Image (spheres, rainbow, N blue to C red):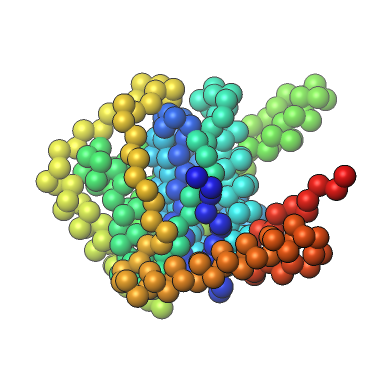
Amino acid sequence: MARRLRFVPEGGALVEVTCRTVHGRFLLKPSRRMNQIVLGVLGRAQRKCPLRIVECVFLSNHYHLLLWVPDAQRLASFMSYFNGNLAREAGRLANWREKFWSRRFQAIVVSEEPYAQIERLEYLLSHGVKEGFVRKPAGWPGVHSAKAHLHGKPLEGIWVDRSKAYWARMRGEEIVKEEVESTETVVLSKLPCWSHLDDTTYNARIGEVIERIEEMGRHNPARLSLPQTPYERPLRSKRSPAPFFHCASKGARRELFEAYCWFVVAYRDATKRLARGDPSPGFPHGSFPPPFPFVV
């Protein structure tokens, strides 16, 4: 099955990004160093390719990000930088030299409806609790944005300058940890439907969401059992089709789906014109044109 065209409505949108490790292996197993590396690479990617990070949660074999992106190009640049660097750093930490991610990240547009956005916010924050690993979101030992909301601590991590370390080795110099490592900070933004709220009110709303999740956790027996090694994999992996969009009403879903259909039609028409040799086929705004045909 062909991949869906990467599509972000004009003007930007809230997007939920999901990415899984190869075979579902626990290559992102939480540890103090792994958490520092994850946050360092995420903060560096945000600084290099600026966009708004609303929530983030990293489990042992996959992660979720809730992002507000202006267009598909910014999302692609951010994810290319983040996934590439995280695969190298986490693979180095786990001593894994093979393919790291199972496939390209999956991005699902969330509608502008408040209910849809709050539902995705609660879904991300509930990770760790809904699986029965912990009773509270902040109890997850890995990277979880609930800790920043509850404790008010910045999400800080470590970025390792591999180029500086490489040239130091080439010169035969001793690698000083303080010279090749720097601190990066992940800046969390407000949920778009709550962006008009002041900080106190916004934190109170987030607290209400977390309280609902903790109430759910009280009725579920929590049994945190991390895998012994990062090379292990789950016996069963969740295999369910992802929705095209996250919406709260049929009307919003129909509107987004129609916009996507028009986008696909315009893209395919432009592809046909390109194949016929038209130098200006007119690809739709926000798309990624294919390369020009091979010339004999």
Q: Would residue 212 appear left or right of 30 to someone viewing this image?
A: left
| Residue closest to the eye, 78 or 9 | 9
Q: Would residue 150 appear left or right of 8 to someone viewing this image?
A: left
Tell me the residue at 62%/62% (across/down): 268
How far across and down, in percent of the image, does residue 173 sit? 77, 24
How far across and down, in percent of the image, does residue 196 sit? 41, 78
How far across and down, in percent of the image, does residue 235 sit? 31, 26
Q: Quadrant of the C terminus?
A: top right
Tell me the residue at 19%/37% (across/down): 222
| Residue closest to the eye, 130 or 37 | 130
**Residue located farthest toward the front when viewing the structure as drawn:** 276
Tell me the residue at 41%/35% (across/down): 61
Q: Would residue 89 appear left or right of 255 to someone viewing this image?
A: right
**In terms of image quadrants, where is residue 191?**
bottom left
How far across and down, in percent of the image, does residue 33 sit? 49, 33
Q: Would residue 105 appear left or right of 147 to someone viewing this image?
A: right
> Can residue 116 be seen here?
yes
> Can residue 142 be seen here?
no
Above or below, 170 relative to 56: above
